[in-house]
Amino acid sequence: MAQHYTQRITDWVAILSETRLPRIPTHSIDFDLSPRDLAEQVYGDPALVLNLIRDVNAIAPRHFEGGIHSMEEAVLMRGTGGLQKVIASMPGAQDTLNADNYRGYLFTCERAIHAACQARRWAFKLADMLPNEVFTAAMLRHSAELAMWIHDHGAVMRAIHEMAPEPTYASEAEYVTLGFSLGELNQALAQAWKLPNLVAESSHSMAADTRSPRSWAVGLAARLAALARQGWEHPEMKPLIEAISELLEISEDNAQEEITAGARDASSLLPWKPVTFAPLLLGEGEEGSVDAAPNPYLSHGQAKGGVCLAPRLNIFNRVRNELERRDYSRSIEKLKIRNEPAKQDDAVLNLAMSGLYDGLGLSRVLYAELRPDRETLAAKFVLGATGDPLFHRFRVDISRPSLIQDLMAKPAAVWLQPNRFDRMRGRAPAPLIGIAAGRSFFLASLYVGEVPRGIFYADRHRVDNRLDETSFKRFRRLCALASVRLKELSK
């Protein structure tokens, strides 16, 4: 039976505060190199990058409020002597971890390095002034996961991996185990450890907007690294390639070539072969996988594996009661942890989404809001589909006749099952077809008084985890209650 932890995010930040990540094996440093070349060698070990940044931030002058953003800066500030001290303080991963944890820790390190190399290539393409800052952020986006492999002999990560057959389903397993996502924890750790701002920004677990090309590049790179060992044929690869193509303003074929080049960069940086993202390098001398045993996380992308979020009536009732009592304190606290302005409107929306996700077990929840032009619905908040470009890029022009336009004409909620949705497919906008992908789903228009504000979309990731009448009634009730509270706040 899966283990459930009751600590809050702030508790985990305190628990992990003194964690020192161990060095990966056979990673060597030549201290006679120039600072730039020395920094490039440091980038080969995510643990060394994290520990060096934390070390420098701990001794940085008070006037240096911006913190360290790259290894070039860190090496210049600490010098080779300081770098040697940091390395000497780090134990070896082989000496620290048992066999199972060691394998998981190296896999996370590999994903971190792969994501970082991809993100840096894209930053160069985007003419970013500080591409190594993007590299560092993509690497440190995995800090919470690395720290969890160390804490308590990796019990948390083993619990998550036992439930998640592939990284695509990790968010459900994380919520079942911890009560929040590793992205949320990573954001809190980034703030507590004074990591580059881009780490916290790109770790945001609910913001659906892309914030900036840099943040979006980091998010896409992390998702690519999570999917990489499933290969090109995984069905979630296609929308990812489309998003990368859009980001870089190149063709999808060229985007695929860029991905292969980024994987090649990562492979050259890693001290072991073969690599788990070998499917992206086929034809270039890479074969197989680093996994000697059958890999339980591989699949052909059929959304039938992984843990299901079970409805939890106690959480649903708590959220409903908080909305009824106009108690937004818990939601506002979460906004502050995510370093967001504590707007009461957003607190209401976040609270409602928490009730849908945690209370009803709806494992993918989207809130899309009308933009100022009053003609475009655009994703604003996402739960359970963080990093999925189909959710983040959700845009619907409601000036054109469609199912969404009909729904937005008045306050309403609908439950569409695949057979009924197929009959209406001609009126469904492409973004809705893309995220539904054969699933049953709930939709509700959100009004504030007489004025349309946005829509809620919710489904369950696993196609065989069906929706039910009770969940639909509670979904409709919670959306309506959020509408009432937003109307009050608008006065």
Image (spheres, rainbow, N blue to C red):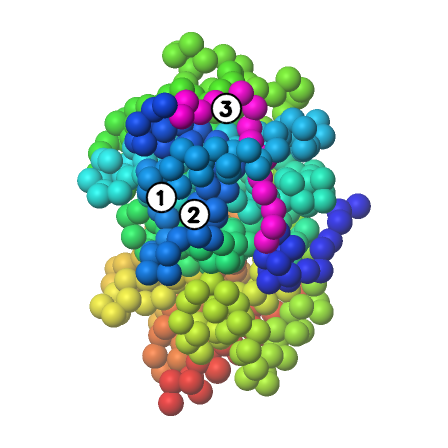
Task: Return the residue nearer the eye: 346 or 137.
Answer: 137
Say left or right for 203 vs 470: left
* Relative to 462, 73 lies left or right: left
- Give the image location of residue 83, x and y in percent: 45, 36
Whether the magenta-drawn stretch holds residue 408 is answered as no
Mark 3 or 1, nearer chain start: 3
Of label 1 and label 2, which has the lower sequence position? 2
Q: Position of residue 195 (x, y in %)?
A: 43, 51
Circle 2: is it few (<14), some (14-19), or many (20+) Cα within 10 Å? Answer: many
Q: Is residue 460 visible?
A: no
255 shown above or below 463: above
In this orientation, which residue lies closer to the viewer: 301 or 109?
A: 109
Pinpoint residue 85: horizontal percent, then vertical percent.
50, 37
Disc on res. 27: 3
Can residue 51 be seen in this snapshot?
Answer: yes
Residue 77 image label: 1
Q: Residue at x 50, y 30 (%)?
A: 110
